[in-house]
Amino acid sequence: MGQRGRKKGSNGEQSRALLLSIAANEFAENGYHDTKVSSIVKRAGLTQPTFYLYFQNKEAIFQELVELFRENLFSLTRKSRLEPGIELSSLSDRITYGLAGIFSFFKENPDLTKIGFYESAIAEEMKRELAIQIEENLTSEVQNGYFSQAIDMCIFAESLVGIIERLTVTKLLPGLKQPNRLAEEIVDIFLNGIINKNN
């Protein structure tokens, strides 16, 4: 899209995507209130009228980024549900694969993750919804015979969300743990515990 503000076509799509990417970085680095539309368009090499062709205001682009994060997170969570018929010997690997998918999305989109999971007004609501989705997954998996019926899956789901939330900040985003390794360690703790079984 040129400076005249053409909205259609691949150039327009590229300009919109560029604005979203830069806005995500600005919001993640500076916070919502200190981010300015003028800063976003300056970095993008576009004009403010161009910005307003795609987004009504700063809040609109922020909310679109939050919704983009939400859609991806919940899609990955739904896909992580264990289907019937998995061999028990493959269970650990299959759970790790699903969890690593979420961590990989966070790792590949750190600005979006910071906005959606930590800074947005609906971050806590999103985490409550995530816990509900995980609990629904677990309930289905209990019915399929993978996990014990004696476990309170609400507590389990809330615990897992807390672990994801904390370790994303302390281990994943700083680069101290890679997505697959972090997922492996979490799954090992949940499935095998921390008791020394050699004693």
Image (cartoon, grey):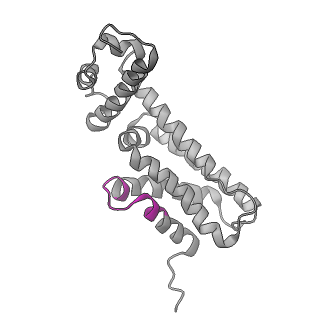
Q: Residue at x 67, y 50 (%)?
A: 136
The image quarter containing residue 1 is top left
Q: Residue farthest to the bottom? A: 199
Asked if the stretch drawn in magenta spans residue 175, the answer is: yes
Q: In the visual, does 58 lie left or right of 68?
A: left
| Rendering coords of residue 69 (x, y %) | 47, 38
| Rendering coords of residue 57 (x, y %) | 37, 17
- From this view, report whether residue 164 is shown above or below residue 115: below
Looking at the image, which is closer to me, 45 or 26?
A: 45
Does the rendering let one see residue 129? no
Q: Residue at x 46, y 61 (%)?
A: 180
| Rendering coords of residue 104 (x, y %) | 45, 51
Q: Residue at x 64, y 67 (%)?
A: 91
The image quarter containing residue 156 is bottom right
- From this view, report whether residue 30 is shown above or below residue 12: below
Does the rendering let one see residue 42? yes
Q: Residue farthest to the top? A: 4
| Rendering coords of residue 37 (x, y %) | 29, 20
Q: In the visual, does 97 lie left or right of 149?
A: left
- From this view, report whether residue 99 is shown above or below residue 36: below
Asked if the stretch drawn in magenta spans residue 117, the answer is: no
Q: Residue at x 31, y 30 (%)?
A: 22
The image quarter containing residue 119 is top left
Looking at the image, which is closer to me, 176 or 157?
A: 176
Q: In the visual, does 9 lie left or right of 49?
A: right
Which region shows up in magenta? Answer: 171-183
